[in-house]
Amino acid sequence: MIEFEIYAEGLREGDRIMQLDSQLGTLNGLRYQIDRNHDMVYFEMEEATVTLNQVYDGFRRASLEPTFVGQMPPELEMGNRTQKIT
């Protein structure tokens, strides 16, 4: 089980929750719960079927700037996936 949290200032303003819900609803295998009192979204998925970039894109399309909270699960680390040649 992979769990992570994202903070998005302004999430509870206007219809941004509905916009975000429509963006994240297209990502298969991703479950989430929105805490509108704290502008937080809690995520979980059984395996890494969605990348963090895809999640961030959903926030940005809803006019929100996502901030990852806590320690990033190794399965979701962004960056170069190349291997060092030995």
Image (tube, grey):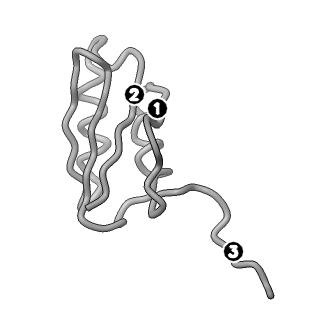
Point out residue 12 in the picture as x, y percentages from the top left corner.
28, 15
Q: Is residue 55 above or below residue 50?
A: above
Q: Dot 3, how many residues are within 10 Å of its Cα: few (below 14), some (14-19), or many (20+)? A: few
Residue flagged by tag 2: what amino acid is it?
A: Tyr
Q: Which residue is mark 3?
A: 82
Residue flagged by tag 1: what amino acid is it?
A: Pro
Q: Dot 2, how many residues are within 10 Å of its Cα: few (below 14), some (14-19), or many (20+)? A: some
* Marks 3 and 2 close (CB-CB < 8 Å): no
Q: Which residue is mark 2?
A: 7
Residue at (22, 15) in percent of width and height: 37
Q: Disc 1 to disc 2, how far (Cα)?
A: 6 Å
Residue flagged by tag 3: what amino acid is it?
A: Thr
Foreground pick, 65 / 84: 84
- Please identify the residue farthest to the top as the structure is shown: 13
Q: Element at badge 2? A: strand
Residue at (28, 12) in percent of width and height: 14
Q: Residue 20 falls in which quadrant of the image?
A: top left
Q: Which mark is residue 74?
A: none
Left or right of 41, for residue 51: right
Q: Disc 3 to disc 2, how far (Cα)?
A: 29 Å
Q: Earlier in the sequence, mark 3 or mark 2?
A: 2
Left or right of 5, for residue 81: right
Q: Earlier in the sequence, mark 1 or mark 2?
A: 2
Foreground pick, 66 / 5: 5
Say which quadrant the N terminus sits in: bottom left
Q: Disc 1 to disc 3, how far (Cα)?
A: 26 Å
Point out residue 65 in the picture as x, y percentages from the top left corner.
49, 27
Q: Dot 1, how many residues are within 10 Å of its Cα: few (below 14), some (14-19), or many (20+)? A: many
Q: Is residue 48 above or below residue 27?
A: below
Q: Which residue is mark 1?
A: 66
